[in-house]
Image (cartoon, rainbow, N blue to C red):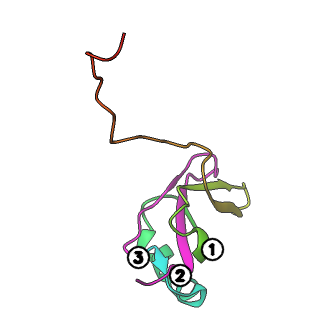
Amino acid sequence: MEHIAALLLVIGCSNTMADCREIHVPVSVFETADQCVAERPFAMGDAQGQAEHIVAKCLAVDPALEDDYDQVVWKVGRDGSIDASLEISNTVVASNMTRPEKDYLSQQ
């Protein structure tokens, strides 16, 4: 299994940079940071026309946490700068698939 070293985040914003949304790109994960950086201008070019302003950033992926990341948190400044990170939410879900059946004869 290949490890992911970088994630390409592409965001489209309105003319005033007030309304922004993530834009889907065909390839968004990369084995090396250099591959992500090399793909970034092409992904931005492919996204042209989907928003007034297109901004993109490569985010480093910690291989030890690769399967734990479940959020991309980002904010775009009015100057087009991106503050973004991969995060692990604090939500924990637990379940137990095996439940002992009640023995109604011995329980009171």
Crowd rating for badge 3 (residues with CA inside 10 Å; few <14, some 14–19, many 20+): few
The amino acid on which the numbered mark 2 sits, given as a three-letter code, is: Pro
Q: Is residue 93 above or below residue 40?
A: above
Stretch of the chain drawn in magenta: 1-27
- Counting residues from the N terminus, which is met first, the one under dot 2 or under dot 1? 2
Image position of 51 (left or right of 103): right
User: Which residue: 49% across, 42% down?
Assistant: 93
**Which residue in the structure is indicated by mark 3?**
27
Is label 2 in a helix, a strand or a loop? helix
Q: Is residue 80 above or below residue 57?
A: above
In this orientation, does residue 17 appear?
yes
**Which residue in the structure is indicated by mark 1?**
62
Q: Are marks 2 and 3 in contact (CB under 8 Å)?
A: no
- Image depth: mark 2 or mark 3 in front: 3
The amino acid on which the numbered mark 3 sits, given as a three-letter code, is: Val
User: Which residue: 52% across, 55% down?
Assistant: 70
- State the residue in front, 11 or 65: 65
Q: Percent from the top left, x then y, of residue 10?
A: 52, 66
